[in-house]
Image (cartoon, rainbow, N blue to C red):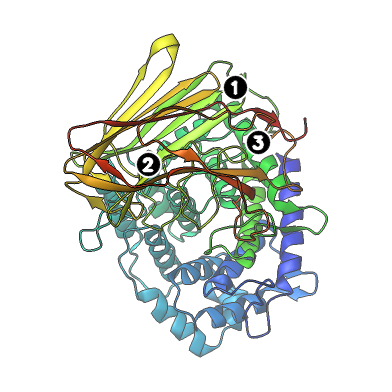
Amino acid sequence: MHNFAEQCMDMARSILSHNLEAIHEDGSIEPVPGENPRSDETGHAILALGEFYRATHETTLGKFNLPKIVAACLTAQMAQESENGLAHAALGLLSFGPSKERNAPWNALSVETREKFDKRLLVRNDYNDHRQAFNIGKAVTRFSLGLSKKDETTKLIDRFVERIAANSSGGFCDDSPKDLATGKIGGCFDVFGILQYVFIRQSLQLHSNVHVRERKLPTLRTYAEKYLKLIPDVVRSDGLGWCVGAGTGAYGQMHLISLILQSMRDGWISADKMPLYKDILRKLFLFFFVTYLDQEQGFLVIRDNERSADEMHTSRIANFDAARYLCQWSRLAKIVGGSLDGTPAQATRATCKTILLDKSARKEQALIIYDNPANSLHVQIPIISGGARGDSDSLAFPHMPGIFDAPVGKYVPAFIPEWTIGDNVFTPSFYAKSLTTRIGLRNAFNVSYEQPDLITKDEKIVPGVGTVRVEWEFLGGKITAKYTLRVKLPVVLKGMRLVMPIAACHSRYHLGSSPRLGENSFGCTIGKDDFQGEWLNYEDVSQDATQCTRYGKVYYYQTFTRVHPQNLRPGQQYHFEISFEPDIVPIES
């Protein structure tokens, strides 16, 4: 992997060179034009420079003095209240060495900043989401730098594992657990689960006590392997990584690559599986390289007039994170050795898998993955919570960027119906009961589930209104969804709506093999409709700068809706059936 390591390091140098120019003498960071700064940007910059030092042992980059910049950024970070930024800054500082006497950035800090940093590391809130990983990084730094004789790392990792077991029967990380006080239903199984393992593993690698690392690695492996085994099913043939839930896009590539390389380094991937994961690694990196890196300018592009990203990911943070990961990949690739050659045999038959993420008496949550290599149809249907963010990232539609996609940060009932009853807008997403998978007629794959109580688009379960049954059928290149709505009391349906966003991948930053819609578009047909809806005229949103996905632009909306109220009677079933047979062709065909 020597060539891969060198390529990663060259890109990291380029990205850092462009973005270090934005760091002022006081450590504050100039945002990219059109964006607002975040309080954790300096922390991410420190960790990027720390990883660069670990990979190269260089303290300068061109005209930039790295220890001086780290000290300035850390001083600026101490003026911000951000657990995210503090944890990244702590690991970045520790990356320059556990000995304070030989840690150049530490020696460049003022006495006041050192004392404030020590006190900030000591303050620790108990989190139920991915921020618990940041607590572990802070504890590792405080002990390893000799700021405390008490090491809390083991206790915090044990608590992290206990939370996983309590919130998921499948052993996955829930980033927004059930909370009776706020009404959260729980089950937010997104890419932040992988982020936690990558961050914790990196923290343990920097721990000054090697015995702590050796004791806790088997525990982490037990749960991290669940994501590792999921990766071959999640990654698309063109290399697209995690694409459901929040925080995807470039991070859906970077987190997966880091987890794979860390697992290769630690020996978690058996020899017979190594060709498979090396092939996946190569595809993930190629997609990341072509789709998100401006190869002429040498920096990461996550947001422009055709593409957008989560609000939490500013362009500065994404660039520093990319540089950090590239340095990490370069270092790990040299340790792993070998080459990326040797592609395993490709699957030729269609497969459908239901990954059960959590099952309890109250709810079931899962990820449905259908892959048909014959026509490149690869969709993921999440039945998970979105953390009540009010967007479309976790709606239960067949996610496939380039074909089926929805705008970032907006709620759109993409490819699935919504029903407005009273003041509530209900969607057949977020949770399930009686989830079953079976083989149907003509060897079609069938997945069905029920919602005994309807749930709103804001993830509030409303008892006593009605129930809905959902059936998905996958046959060749055709996807059919059947919805059966029943109400428990006489109600008035104010409206029913389904929206088809017509989007495309970025016109410049894309792989030629990535999919796009052909002339026949979605191949959509309405099989049965007891709501008597109708298609509206196309809505042109191509000039709306906010109508972007993480991968490209939304150009049109096509809406199917019922425009008049409808009286619904209890005991009667109301059916709605819709089929998609998308015309999938390569972008450069």
Residue designated by label 3? 283
- Expressed as whole percent of the image width and height from the top left, the position of residue 108 reads 61, 82
Left or right of 291 in this view: 474: left
Residue 479, placed above or below residue 101:
above
| Residue 46 or residue 175, whichever sits in front | 175
Residue 123, placed above or below residue 244:
below
- Expressed as whole percent of the image width and height from the top left, the position of residue 337 reads 66, 38
- Expressed as whole percent of the image width and height from the top left, the position of residue 107 reads 59, 81
Residue designated by label 1? 373
Which residue is painted at 51% across and 89% down in the image? Answer: 111
Image quarter in which the N terminus is found: top right
Callout 2 amino acid: Tyr
Local SS, label 1: loop
Label 3 close to label 1 by CB (< 8 Å): no
Residue 269, placed above or below residue 312:
above
Name the residue furthest right. 296
Q: Earlier in the sequence, mark 3 or mark 1?
A: 3
In this view of the protein, can residue 96 be seen by the observer?
no
Local SS, label 3: helix
| Residue 127 or residue 503, whichever sits in front | 503
In this view of the protein, can residue 313 be seen by the observer?
yes
Callout 1 amino acid: Pro
Q: Which mark is residue 223?
A: 2
- Expressed as whole percent of the image width and height from the top left, the position of residue 302 reads 65, 57
Q: Which mark is residue 95?
A: none
Crowding near pointer 1: few (<14 within 10 Å), some, many (20+)?
Answer: some
Left or right of 128 in this view: 334: right
